[in-house]
Amino acid sequence: MATFYVTEDTGTAIIGLPSLQAMKIVSLNHQLKTTQQRTVKDKKHLIKEYPEVFRGIGKFQGTYHIHLDQSVPPSTHPPEKSSFEIEGQNQI
């Protein structure tokens, strides 16, 4: 068994990754999980794919309370501008 001393020194590491792997202190996981991104064709397609989201007025389950920090002054922000080419894509 080896003794390790942890310091706050920012110098060169005494022990490297290969040694840590050999002692089974560190292991590398090379798996990559990805999900396929769906494209939204139009508003009608979106409503058809997720009907439960667009049915009724919706509500939170149970009681919900919003906490406001009274020391923060109220503010408003104007909508962000978008170029003419993508403006139609932003509206669903």
Image (cartoon, rainbow, N blue to C red):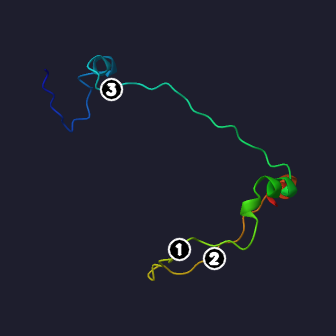
Q: Which residue is at 28% across, 17% downward? A: 19
Label 3, residues with CA under 10 Å away: few <14, some 14-19, many ≥20 = few
- Read off the residue under disc 2: 76
Q: Compared to 83, does 59 lie above or below? A: below
- Read off the residue under disc 1: 62
Answer left or right for 74 relative to 84.
Answer: left
Q: What type is the residue that disc 3 sits on?
A: Val
Quadrant, the C terminus: bottom right
Quadrant, the N terminus: top left
Which numbered marker is on residue 26?
3
Marks 3 & 2, CB-CB < 8 Å contact: no
Q: Looking at the image, is mark 3 or mark 2 nearer the viewer?
A: 3
Res 84 visible? no
Is tag 3's residue or tag 2's residue first in the polypeptide sequence? 3
> Dot 3: what SS?
loop
Tell me where residue 58 sits by quadrant.
bottom right
Answer left or right for 34 relative to 2.
Answer: right
Residue 89: horizontal and vertical position, in percent?
83, 54
Residue 14: horizontal and vertical position, in percent?
23, 23
> Dot 2: what SS?
loop
Pick the front one: 44 or 7 = 44
Label 1, residues with CA under 10 Å away: few <14, some 14-19, many ≥20 = few
Could you give the CA–CA distance between mark 1 and mark 3, rounded to whole angstroms? 44 Å
Q: What type is the residue that disc 2 sits on?
A: Thr
Marks 2 & 1, CB-CB < 8 Å contact: no
Q: Compared to 92, does 6 lie above or below? A: above
Residue 4: horizontal and vertical position, in percent?
16, 28
Looking at the rendered structure, the number of numbered marks drawn on it comes to 3
Pick the front one: 8 or 58 = 58
